[in-house]
Image (tube, rainbow, N blue to C red):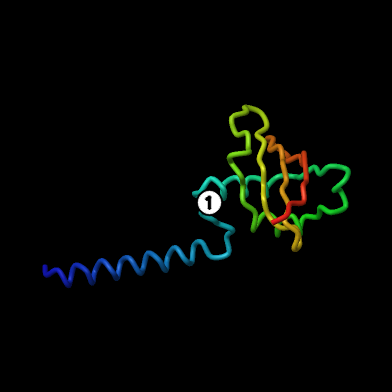
Amino acid sequence: MKLIYRLGFYMMGFSMGLIFLAFILKGKKTSCNYGPNDRVIANLSKKAWKPQNKVNSAFDSIALQGFLNKASVDFVKSNTQKDSCKTYFINGYWGEKPISIRVENCEKSVEVLQLNYRSE
């Protein structure tokens, strides 16, 4: 069999497989969180948040999800070696204000330990 025919059969099978996957995964909330930052953000967004009393009125689920979509985790300041509840520093924007949040990520919930407005 000539090389051009092999490539043609390969491309035909590959394209059919992509179409098959597109139909199967259509409408499902699938994501590829391979990086450490993406995995932490995805984990935090699935849990219930317990804010501090001072920032209780500022937290709502829609604004929080918008914050987490554009946030980044500062792993240098974070304590990920703990067994029970790991502590993460998250930098992002709340509205148009740059903020840093220190959170404690436990098994079922996330507790906000500190909220700082930062200057750029």
Q: Nearer the viewer, residue 24 or 120?
A: 120
Where in the figure is residue 6, as x and y percent of width and height? 19, 67
Q: Nearer the viewer, residue 58 or 62?
A: 58
The quarter of the image holding the N terminus is bottom left
Left or right of 29? Residue 1 is left
* Quadrant of residue 17 within the rendered picture: bottom left
The quarter of the image holding the C terminus is bottom right
Going 49% across and 49% down the picture, which residue do you hit?
34
Going 81% across and 55% down the picture, which residue do you hit?
60
Pointer 1 local density, CA inside 10 Å: few below 14, some 14–19, many at least 20: few
Q: Amino acid at mark 1?
A: Asn
Where in the figure is residue 65, as x and y percent of width and height? 71, 56
Residue indicated by mark 1: 33
Left or right of 31? Residue 15 is left
Q: How many marks?
A: 1
Going 48% across and 66% down the picture, which residue do you hit?
23
Q: Is residue 93 above or below residue 34?
A: below
Secondary structure found at label 1: loop
Q: Is residue 41 above or below residue 10?
A: above
Going 33% across and 65% down the picture, which residue do you hit?
14
Where in the figure is residue 80, as x and y percent of width and height? 60, 34
Left or right of 79? Residue 51 is right
Q: Residue furthest front?
A: 120
Where in the figure is residue 68, as x and y percent of width and height? 67, 54
